[in-house]
Image: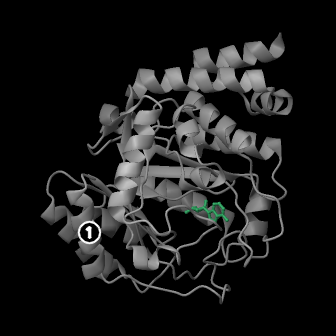
């Protein structure tokens, strides 16, 4: 029948039209989901084998100038206790992370301009100097000028994560009163042009999001062809305007992870912390549905709970070493192997 043809087509050709994706999402059954997951897993194994890459995540500031409706650290949430790690504290996190075996550090924060281009440049330079040539530096600091992206790349940053959040212009504008849809895309294009390995991605189950919107997210990603794709469920945070809304489901998110693997087969796809928050085995389930990266937190325990983008975020009382070994056990429990290398994307390896 038609649907089995769509499942087979995406597995064989890594391609579907937006209409075909919407069609599939509208009629998908639990048996279809299992087929998608297992095909996505086989595709992941073809491109990346049984390895899962680890990234040490440092959430270095929860101060943010933006006011995204869904996000717990939005500027107008006066209930968050704000913090900034100093460059010395960030370097101490890297030392700890290096000791634990991480060879990628993800420096993530709210949009906090206290960290100037100069400060970040010096910090990146020092990280690259300390661990040269083993370590990759990933930035996840939101929107800046293209010249700043250029300068940070020159300082040694290798990768940049910036989810497009949603490919629906209408939904994007509703959710981001302080931002513009076109700016987001311009940033992603600039980052790619400069030579970063780029990560984009979106949330599943946003209020008002349709299946056609989700199909558009996948089509946009296929066209952008980023190195990394982060997909997580929307999880309501009570101190935001969306606090009373419904969140995304584990099934819907896993279907999007599997489709992302099938449509952009050479990408790196994290099993996100948000999936681990929704279900105790959410990340393991994502690894079995095509994900191949996990980003354990190495943020100091003293500030972890303050970096609450959504509620009930896991690992709030844990120490960096707890997360390191917990993740290794989880990865092994579903039959995969930890790879502590830099873990560059196949697209990057092929084309430099
Ligand atoms: N639920 C799930 N994900 C969220 N993010 C921000 N707020 C939430 C939330 N309430 C995601 C965004 C952002 C990433 C760092 O976290 O997609 O890009």
Q: Residue at x 40, y 56 (%)?
A: 323
Q: At 73% from the left edge and 62% from the top edge, which residue is drawn?
A: 172
Would you say the beta carbon of the disc 1 residue lies within 8 angstroms of ligand 1? no
Camera-nearest residue between 207 and 352: 207
User: Residue 253, relative to residue 23: is it above or below?
Assistant: below
Residue farthest toward the bottom in the current orientation of the protein: 78
On the question of residue 118 being in view, the answer is no
Is label 1 in a helix, a strand or a loop?
helix
Q: Residues within 10 Å of mark 1 (few under 14, many from 20)?
A: many
Q: Position of residue 122 (x, y in %)?
A: 23, 76
Residue 60 lies in quadrant: bottom left
Instruction: Indicate the colouring scheme.
Output: one colour
The x and y percentages for residue 270 are 49, 45
Quadrant location of the N terminus? top right
Residue 307 image position (x, y, % from top left): 52, 74
- Specify whether 279 is left or right of 315: right
Whether residue 172 is visible here, answered yes or no, is yes
Q: Nearer the viewer, residue 352 or 342?
A: 342
Q: Quadrant of the C terminus?
A: top left
Q: Residue furthest top?
A: 1
Q: Is residue 347 above or below residue 16?
A: below
Indicate left or right for 144 with 19 as reference.
Answer: left
Question: Quadrant holding ligand 1?
Answer: bottom right
| Residue 201 placement (x, y as % from top left) | 58, 50
Determine the residue positioned at 45% across, 34% down: 333
* Circle 1 residue: 124
Residue displayed at 68% across by 24% down:
34
Query: How many marks can you see?
Result: 1
């Amino acid at each position: 029948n038609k649907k089995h043809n769509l499942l087979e087509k995406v597995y064989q050709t890594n391609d579907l039209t937006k209409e075909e994706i919407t069609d599939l999402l509208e009629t998908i059954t639990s048996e279809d989901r299992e087929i998608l997951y297992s095909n996505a897993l086989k595709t992941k194994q073809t491109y990346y084998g049984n390895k899962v890459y680890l990234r040490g995540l440092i959430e270095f500031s929860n101060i943010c100038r933006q006011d995204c409706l869904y996000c717990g650290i939005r500027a107008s949430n006066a209930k968050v206790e704000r913090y900034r790690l100093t460059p010395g504290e960030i370097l101490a996190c890297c030392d700890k992370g290096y000791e634990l075996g991480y060879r990628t550090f993800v420096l993530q924060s709210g949009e906090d301009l206290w960290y100037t281009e100069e400060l970040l440049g010096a910090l990146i330079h020092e990280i690259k100097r300390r661990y040269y040539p083993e370590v990759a530096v990933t930035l996840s600091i939101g929107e800046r000028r293209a010249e700043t992206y250029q300068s940070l790349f020159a300082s040694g940053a290798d990768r940049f994560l910036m989810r497009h959040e949603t490919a629906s212009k209408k939904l994007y504008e509703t959710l981001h009163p302080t931002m513009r849809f076109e700016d987001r895309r311009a940033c992603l294009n600039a980052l790619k042009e400069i030579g970063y390995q780029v990560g984009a991605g979106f949330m599943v189950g946003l209020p008002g999001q349709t299946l056609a919107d989700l199909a558009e997210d996948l089509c946009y990603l296929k066209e952008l062809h980023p190195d990394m794709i982060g997909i997580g469920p929307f999880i309501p945070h009570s101190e935001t305007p969306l606090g009373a809304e419904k969140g995304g489901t584990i099934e819907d998110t896993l279907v999007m992870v599997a489709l992302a693997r099938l449509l952009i087969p050479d990408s790196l796809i994290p099993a996100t912390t948000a999936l681990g928050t929704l279900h105790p085995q959410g990340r393991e389930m994502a690894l079995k549905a095509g994900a191949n990266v996990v980003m354990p937190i190495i943020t100091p325990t003293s500030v972890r709970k303050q970096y609450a983008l959504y509620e009930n975020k896991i690992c709030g009382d844990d120490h960096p070493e707890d997360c390191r070994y917990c993740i290794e056990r989880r990865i092994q429990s579903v039959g995969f192997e930890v790879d502590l290398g830099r873990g560059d994307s196949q697209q990057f390896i092929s084309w430099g």
